[in-house]
Amino acid sequence: MLNEQKIKKMNKLAAYEAGEGKEHLAISNYYRSDYIGLALIKNFFLTTIAYGLLLLVYIGYRLDYLMENIHKMNLVLLGVKAVGVYVGMLVVYSLLTYIYCSVKYSRAQKGIQGYYKNLSQLQKIYEREERRTGKLMGRRKQA
């Protein structure tokens, strides 16, 4: 006999696992600090690469001006400015990454809690069915 409640729970769980649950389950394998730390490490490398590319594009765009006026420029000050912009960019993107990953992790934890709640409810349904079928089997054997 089909149990509609069990089918609905199973369908809900399968939809979650196929959708956002796939990402939530992957995130739940990490501790919060590990997940955010890994994201910050990725952010460091990606920001460094992006800044390097932006700096190369800027230098390429301003190459004529730089070649004509390089003898007049304070190269130490120019280097300090370049490093300062890099550090500023790194701090801003690191803060954004930290906030984004913190929110994403907390949402994943809430989703996983609901998922486990539904799993335990499904398990209770199975246990009830087993008790019922066990009692029915016991009555049939006595008859």
Image: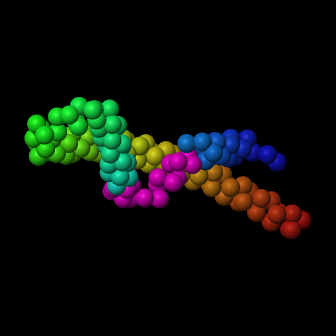
Please give left or right for residue 26 compared with residue 137 in the image.
left
Q: Residue at x 80, y 59 (%)?
A: 136
Q: Is residue 22 magenta?
A: yes
Residue at the image position 33 percent from the left and 37 percent from the top: 60
Q: Nearer the viewer, residue 29 or 75?
A: 75
Residue displayed at 51% across by 54% down: 26
The residue shown at (87%, 63%) is 140
Residue nearer the viewer, 5 or 31: 31
Q: In the image, residue 51 lies at what x, y percent? A: 31, 43
Q: How is the image coloured?
A: rainbow
Q: Nearer the viewer, residue 126 or 12?
A: 12
- Judged by its main secondary structure, the magenta piece is helix
User: Who is closer to the viewer here, 143 or 28?
Assistant: 28
In this picture, which residue range is highlighted in magenta? 21-40
Q: Is residue 40 visible?
A: no
Residue 132 in the figure: left or right of residue 46: right
Exactly how many numbered labels are in the figure?
0
Q: Position of residue 8 (x, y in %)?
A: 68, 41
Location of residue 122 in the rendering, given as x and y in whole percent from the top left corner: 63, 51
Residue 31 x %, y %:
38, 58
Does 136 sit left or right of 73 as displayed? right
- Residue at the right extreme? 143
